[in-house]
Image (cartoon, grey):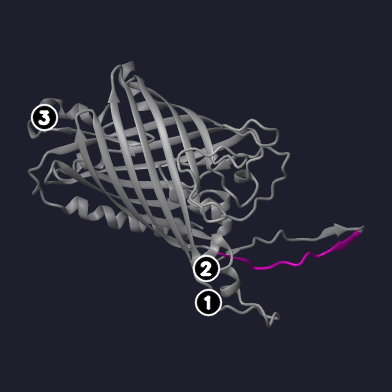
Amino acid sequence: MRARVGWAVVVIGALAIPAWAAPDTSTSTSTSTSTSTSTSTSTSTEADLDSDSDADDIGPWHGLHLDVTATELSGIVGEPEAYANQLSLELGPSFDLGHHLGSRFWKPLSLSASIGLSGELAGSDPAFRGPQFPSSALRSDAPEAVVITETAGARSTSGAERDLRLSDLTLTFSHPSVAHLPGRITLGAGARFILPTSRASFNDGLYTAASLSASLSRVFGRVTVRLRERATRYLYDADTSPIQPLGGTVVVSGLEVSPESFAHDGAMTPSFGFLTGLDLEVALPHDLSASAGYDLVNTFSHVPDACGVAGVPTADVCADGSLIHEVRRGRHDAGSFSLGLSWQARPSLSLSLDLETYQPVRHPNGDLANPFLRVSRDNYSALSLSATVSIDELTRGSR
């Protein structure tokens, strides 16, 4: 497994090398980036960048930041055996890489990471026990991580246990101000790598999910509108999900037998995908802000190399599979909607209340689903309350 992580680190290093060698050719307005659960940007003039206060922009840790986010998530359906309540803790270190490159163009460039640990307080969420992944555990900042978890094989956990789940590691390069276009539109770009640190991804043979993104944003007074596009390539050991053998023997009716094992379960792993998103952010009085966003996630799985099945002359998985809605053409379409209200209580503390909905775009009968709210036992919609503490800001205040 070390080879997988090492391969991804090499790719990240290759992406960062041009930044160190880039000449100072930009004369446009630059943007300084502060990263938390979602990335926010503020634009300053060149005079501000040359002022003595520029050293304070990188914070007390010389550009290094550390956010810790605690989130309690509650399903909105209270029926017996359907209600879900989860608690998660996420670490979000980030580094203002551009501040150390000596170039105005690269100054907004940042490198951030995130990894989390979550568990159930109530409910029987399949995310902790099986291959399904309901929206209640959605990471709204990385919907491609949901695709990886949906692909993962079942865990060896009974329904009565309360198991903790470690997420995969996400590394993100972000440049929110690559160019300023006509009409006061700002072009942003980024690259993201998801590395296998969860048990499910290790078992499923994930190498990485690498993606490139571009965004167009426009500020209208207190309102910011942003259009995003992301292309993701998923890299696995095999085109089909592997089955990890239990090993050893089992006792059946008093007899010790060796169970039959299979190398793969026949489910095709994702190959590539596209994400199109639209965000709306509004700055409100008293350090409040409201946001709404929608992501359309199109995922394409691998295509079977052969349609026949050994020992079953009449089987045609290509033709039979097309009769099932979720696997037709090897494509799965999902929608992610979020609506939130945030409060910057202190420079080191922010609170947010969010409604999140993640579900297939269409119902099994082919009808379009309501993208905003879906109240059902599947917990497609959920409410979350989050508190984010900036450790570096705490140290600034203690000086």
What's the magenta region?
255-268
Amino acid at the residue labelled 2: Asp
Q: Relative to the observer, which residue lies in front, 3 or 158?
A: 158
Q: Confirm whether the magenta stretch covers residue 130.
A: no
Q: Which residue is mark 1?
A: 305
Amino acid at the residue labelled 3: Asp
| Residue 193 pos. (x, y %) | 39, 52
Q: Which residue is mark 2?
A: 239
| Element assignment for label 1 | loop
Q: Which residue is mark 3?
A: 48
| Element assignment for label 3 | helix
Other residues around mark 1 within 10 Å, as few (<14) / some (14–19) / many (≥20) = few
* Left or right placement of residue 62 versus residue 275 in this view: left
| Element assignment for label 2 | loop
Q: Residue at point 15% right, 25% down?
A: 53
- From this view, report whether residue 65 is shown above or below residue 257: above
- From this view, report whether residue 190 is shown above or below residue 291: below
**Decide: marks 2, 3 in contact (CB < 8 A)?**
no
Amino acid at the residue labelled 1: Asp
Q: Residue at point 52% right, 63% down?
A: 269
Q: Nearer the viewer, mark 1 or mark 3?
A: 1
